[in-house]
Amino acid sequence: MQLNIPDEVIQNELASNITFIVLKEIEKRSSLLTKTVELPPYPNKSQVKEILRIGDDKLSGWISKGLKIQQWSEQDIRIERTELQRFLKETFEI
């Protein structure tokens, strides 16, 4: 049995799916930027992960992409809130 589907139907469905995915990604990235306001001026890594609801791998990835950190002591790594906001704006171009 062979089923013929007009190209217009496939194009419309594909365009709709792509639009949905893009809008969800923009919403997620915008939400990250908005949540940074809830952070203290110099949060530690745990506070950043908790408030932004991200994992250690994602934060480590951001650091490897250029997010600047501050080493306050051997065990205390901080991230300036304005630096995080700058990084998210520039990296994700929200």
Image: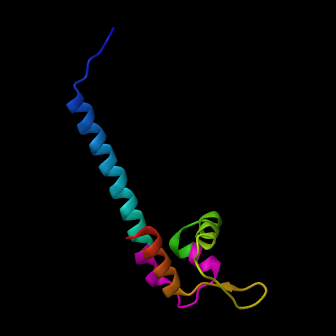
For residue 48, side relative to residue 2 (left or right): right
For residue 39, above or below residue 61: below
Looking at the image, is 64 positioned above or below residue 18? below
Indicate whether 12 appears above or below 68.
above
Residue 89: x and y, percent? 43, 75
In magenta, the rendered stretch is 33-49
Please give left or right for residue 52 compared with residue 13 in the image.
Answer: right
Q: Does the segment drawn in magenta span residue 47?
A: yes
Quadrant occupied by the N terminus: top left
Q: Residue at x 51, y 72 (%)?
A: 52
| Up/down of 32 relative to 21, above or below | below
Residue in view at x 59 percent, y 85 percent: 43
Residue 39: image x %, image y %? 51, 84
The C terminus is located in which quarter?
Answer: bottom left
Q: Is residue 66 left or right of residue 89?
A: right
Residue that protrudes farthest toward the top in the picture: 1
Residue drawn at x 40%, y 70% is 93
Please count the marks in the image.
0
* Principal secondary structure, stretch drawn in magenta: helix
Residue 25: x, y in percent? Answer: 40, 59
